[in-house]
Image (cartoon, rainbow, N blue to C red):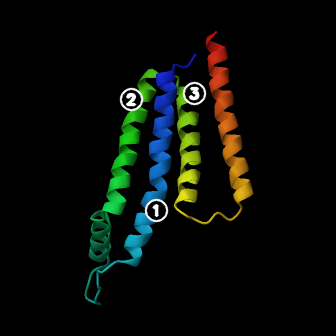
Amino acid sequence: MISSTEAISLLLVGALWGCTNPFMRQGSIESKSNSTINTTQDDDKETESLLKSLFRLAKIKIWLPYLINQLGSLLYYKQLASSNLTLSVPVCNATAMVFSCITSFFLGERVNQPGRAALGVTLVLSGVQICMYSSSESLN
């Protein structure tokens, strides 16, 4: 049976990944719209692209969620070393999608079909529950 600390770790990975994705997307969109790099005809396209990328990385709204996301990845790799692979991967990815949908909703991002999104979240959570149940049954 899956231990409570293992389940919490898997959910935490999903939360770290899922909650940071909307913030990174929002920070990237804001940095693209607020870009202050002026280009001239003499500028090289590669240099311009590099400068824009560096300018985006200087924004805290991009690198702070990215850093938190990478902390989730470190926890994920630690968890993979000590848990059932067939359970860890689907649970982390599915809960990341769920947390991403929830965070996007709270940030005010528009959802085209909220009923379908809610149904999708419910189905994903049901699938995670089935994976956890079947994993505990196979250990008995």
Q: Is residue 100 above or below residue 122?
A: below
Could you give the CA–CA distance between mark 1 and mark 2, rounded to whole angstroms? Answer: 26 Å
Q: Earlier in the sequence, mark 2 or mark 3?
A: 2
- Say which amino acid is labelled 2: Lys
Name the residue beneath numbered marker 1: 25
Name the mark on residue 86: 3
* Residue at the (66%, 30%) spot, across then down: 129
Tell which circle, 1 or 3, labels the residue nearer the N-terminal end.
Answer: 1
Q: Nearer the viewer, mark 1 or mark 3?
A: 1
Residue occupying image coordinates x 30% and y 65%: 59
Question: Which amino acid, mark 1?
Answer: Arg
Mark sitting earlier along the chain (1/2): 1
Which residue type carries mark 3? Thr
Toward the bottom, the furthest residue is 41
Q: Quadrant of the C terminus?
A: top right
On-image quarter of the N terminus: top right
| Quadrant of the rendered image containing residue 46 | bottom left
Q: Residue at x 64, y 63 (%)?
A: 111
Q: Secondary structure at mark 2?
A: helix
Q: Where residue 78 is drawn, which disc sits there?
A: 2
Element carrying mark 1:
helix
- Label 3: few (<14), some or many (≥20) within 10 Å? few
In the rendered image, the vertical position of residue 124 relative to residue 129, given as above or below: below
